[in-house]
Image (cartoon, helix red, strand yellow):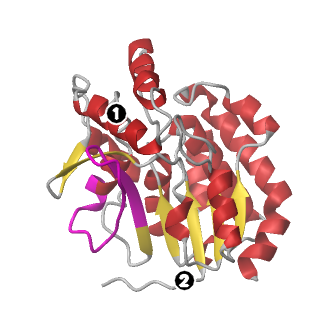
Amino acid sequence: MVQQGNENALVLGGGGAVGGAWMLGVLAGLADAGVDLEHADVVIGTSAGAIFGSRLACGHPPSELYARQLAGDDRIDLHVTVAQTARFLWAALASRDPERSVRRLGRAAQSTRPPAGLDLPGAVEELLHGATQWPTRALRITAVDAVSGEVRAFDADSQVTLVEAVAASCAVPLVWPPVTLAGRRWMDGGTRSTANLQLATGHRRVLAVVPLPSGVGPHPSAQEQAARLTAEGAAVSLLVPDRAARRAMGRDMTDNARRPAAARAGHAQASTAAEAVARAWRT
């Protein structure tokens, strides 16, 4: 069984192709400024954060992942139609109750057909670039039960492969159908929380890099979740896109053409935030 400490947790949120690029820029910028990301006892990844969190936990350095974003590599192709967006919003926003909202979205997700000629696990395996086995370093990959709406964190003891867990975490409702694992159907880990900071409960220090601080629907924002962890005694460093980064990212998180600019904006933002992050991370 993988053993993990309870000191430092690195939380990586979802945000599509563009949000993932910004996140990698932040991580590379922090590493370049001397923040030791290897100091994390556990990496918690959601959606895009599941992909790149897996690669980090498997030993891929932030500088390498950042360089690939600048070069236009590691494309995450999501072809989202207006009709899919409308159905997503209708399901997620029709109720103010978080549980009803996520279950409505789960029912809609289960009616989704796979895009013709596209294979989600195959695409995920390609994006993982060889990081397809659970690492010895503690890694948790989030997904949401499409029936109950409950969040689960898959890990090396879950008896599913890393590729399967990451594919489930990336199964965006109405774009991809849920992924079947362990007799249940699972959809995008960011369905009810874009970051799932609650899974870092019990850690003394938390570094969260969250491209989209708020999800769609009546669910807690990353800032609200960070405040709860802080109230429980954790030292939380939460990084979300600043104004310059939001301009670089634009509104369409699937626009691969914006990834290099988003990554550079994340790197620049990290340079400003690194001193404060380093103090909290090493306390």
Task: Report whether residue 85 is seen.
Answer: yes
Residue with the most extreme left position: 183
Name the residue nearer the viewer: 182 or 56. 182
Secondary structure beneath dot 2 equals loop
Residue, x 24% and y 44% (percent of image)?
A: 179
Report whether 76 appears left or right of 265. Answer: left
Figure label count: 2
- Residue type at the position of mark 1: Arg
Front of the two marks 2 and 1: 1
In the shown orientation, is residue 260 left or right of residue 51?
right
Q: Position of residue 95 (x, y in %)?
A: 46, 31
Residue at image point 25% right, 27% down: 112
Write down the quadrant of residue 187 in the picture: top left
Check the picture and name the quadrant holding the C terminus.
Answer: bottom right
- Label 1 near label 2: C-beta < 8 Å? no
Looking at the rendering, the stretch of residues picked out in magenta corresponds to: 140-164
Mark number for residue 189? none
Q: Position of residue 37 (x, y in %)?
A: 63, 71
Q: Where 128 sits versus 235, above or below?
A: above
Q: Is residue 273 above or below residue 257?
A: below
Could you tell whether 4 is left or right of 163 in the image?
Answer: right
Mark 2 = which residue?
Answer: 6
Residue tagged 1: 104
Q: Can residue 59 be seen by looking at this rendering?
A: no
Q: Nearer the viewer, residue 162 or 64?
A: 162
Residue beneath the point at 72% across and 64% down: 237
